[in-house]
Amino acid sequence: MRILVNGAWRETTGGELAAVLSELGYGDAIVATAINGEFVAATARAHTPIAEGDRIEVLAPMQGG
Amino acid sequence: MLELYGTSLRSRLLLGTARYPSPSVLTEAVRACGCEVVTVSLRREAGAERAGQGFWSIIRSLGVRVLPNTAGCHCVKEAVTTAHMAREVFGTSWVKLEVIGEDDTLQPDVFGLVEAATILCRDGFEVFPYTTEDLVVAERLLAAGCGVLMPWAAPIGSGRGLNNLFALKTLRAHFPQVPIIIDAGLGVPSHAAQALELGFDAVLVNTAVAQARDPVQMAAAFGRAVEAGYGARLAGPIEPRDLAAPSTPVVGTAFRG
């Protein structure tokens, strides 16, 4: 299925968010996630299904003022 | 000691972590100024990129507290979601809440700010609202549950110093018990010293340090300025006056009378 990850269309096999993150190469990276603008806690990723066309944000620590 | 949401801090300087020439310069700057709180942010990261992981590792090695921001958010929904994401990643309920309303000045959208602060305080966050010097907005933020105010001195990165002195003094006088941190727009250490002399509790600086020719030296200078300003505040500055008052005693002056 096609989903929008950080603003770019990606092809994935779908499933739960945790599996999709692994497929996209995030592995054990420290990231925070949101689907369609709603925060998804790390503990919820394993039972949060992804749907065609979902907008996923994957954010990591960065410099800030 | 500076008390922010029950946390005692020795340093009254908070430092931003963006725009340094290199991670090592950032590290040295943090150590040089003695700050105990640094601001951080969240950004999109590709799976194999891992830049954020390296940055987070550096920050953790410094042993300082982090204050995550919601920089770049232009609406309540974005800011609230980003705050939740930051709380999970950084493991803190502190959030520097930014809801930007105008791109040329990066002026806060104070209406969105109050709305987002209300939601986040209800959700258990300890909110540091990046606001203007507006007294009524400050009252709304405190009513929403904020325990700290962070008014701007001037637009972010402008280096102009305390731009609206009258309103800032009014804000300080109106909320004597509320920790107020001057955030954004400071350019040189004397601006920071002035803020502390006026009774503000702390300052947050980023661009003035990170973009200085020598960020480490500038960080140290800001650290000393904050101490000097706070010391002066405790010492009780004299009031300015229009006429001269001789400092040398006039009694017994030679050649008089």
Image (tube, coloured by chain):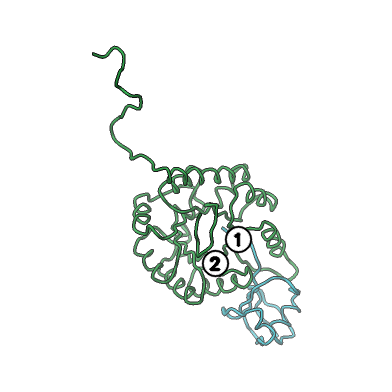
Residue B151 percent coordinates (x, y): 43, 58
Corner quadrant of residue A20: bottom right
Residue B50 percent coordinates (x, y): 73, 66
Nearer-the-camera pick, B11 or B43: B11
Instruction: Provide the chain ID for the residue under circle 1.
Output: B
Image mark count? 2
Nearer-the-camera pick, B251 or B98: B251
Q: Do the residues labelled 1 and 2 touch (CB within 8 Å)?
A: yes
Corner quadrant of residue B237: top left
Left or right side of B76 for B256:
left
Left or right side of B122 for B56:
right
Left or right side of B167 for B49:
right
For chain A, give the colour. Answer: cyan
Q: Which amino acid does label 1 sit on?
A: Arg
Regarding residue B191, the answer to whether it shows in the image is no
For residue B169, above or below residue B228: below
For residue B171, above or below residue B226: below
Residue beneath label 1, please?
A: B65
Q: Which amino acid does label 2 sit on?
A: Trp
Residue at image point 41% right, 59% down:
B132
Instruction: Provide the chain ID for the residue under circle 2.
Output: B
Give the mark nearest the N terminus, 1 or 2.
1
Chain letter tied to green: B
Label 1 Cα neighbours within 10 Å, binned few <14 / some 14-19 / many ≥20:
some
- Say which mark, if any, is on residue A14: none
For residue B194, above or below residue A39: above
Instruction: Name the quadrant of the C terminus of chain A.
Output: bottom right
Is label 1 in a helix, a strand or a loop? strand
Q: Measure how far apart labels 1 and 2 are at the Cα level.
A: 10 Å
Residue B247 percent coordinates (x, y): 35, 27
Residue beneath label 2, please?
A: B94
